[in-house]
Image (cartoon, helix red, strand yellow):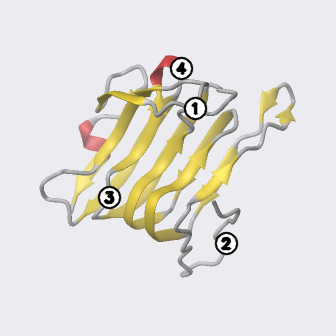
Amino acid sequence: MASATPRERGRVLRAPGGISSESRQPFRGRWRPRNANGGGAKGAEDKVFQFNGAGELTVSGFQVEDFGKLVRSCGNCSTMYERDIVVKDVDVTAPGKSLVGINSDYGDTATLSSIRIHGDSGKKIEPCVRYEGNDDGDEPEEVGSGPDGEFCLYSESDISYE
């Protein structure tokens, strides 16, 4: 996985293996939040962002096209944490599989708002997918998708199809 942060407006990050965040640095008794503000990614076969550390990751003002998952909370790391993922003001262009994947059994949450999905009239891109994570390296099992008011926090009005 690439370790990079897109910083310049108009540049596209091409990271076929995605971007990984493994930071576990404490910040005043809490995990330091990580932010991806602006930028974009295209052609990520699997994950654009894989979140392996603890705490919060916010992706905002981002564009993604032709991808597997925009953000995935690690589903089978040897040390698992509760993670909160916020995705807001994001433009998504199909094809893609899902915006966020979280582990509900570890208390992960995903909050989505102002998501614009382009070229997916069949609504095949899942906004939020819940998994049963584990710490033994097994592939996590999908246990549900869609807003549930507990882990996948958004309403249908937070997602527009254009």
Q: Which residue position holds label 3?
A: 96
Point 43% across, 24% down: residue:
151
Q: Mark 3 or mark 1, which is nearer to you?
A: 1
Disc number at residue 107?
A: 4
Q: Quadrant of the N terminus?
A: bottom right
- Estimate how packed mark 1 is, as few (under 14), some (14 to 19) or many (20 or more) residues with alpha carbons within 10 Å: few
Task: Measure how far apart labels 3 and 1 are at the Cα level.
Answer: 25 Å
Q: Which of the pair 106/116 is nearer the observer?
A: 106
Task: Measure how far apart labels 1 and 4 are at the Cα level.
Answer: 19 Å
Task: Measure how far apart labels 3 and 4 are at the Cα level.
Answer: 25 Å
In this rendering, the answer to whether 32 lies above or below 35 is: above
Disc number at residue 137?
A: 1
The amino acid at mark 4 is Gly
- Estimate how packed mark 3 is, as few (under 14), some (14 to 19) or many (20 or more) residues with alpha carbons within 10 Å: many
At which x and y percent is residue 66? 35, 67
Name which of mark 1 and mark 4 comes first in the sequence.
4
Disc number at residue 17?
A: none
Name which of mark 3 and mark 4 comes first in the sequence.
3
Name which of mark 2 and mark 4 comes first in the sequence.
2
Point 71% across, 41% down: residue:
33
Dot 3 and dot 2 residues touching (CB under 8 Å): no
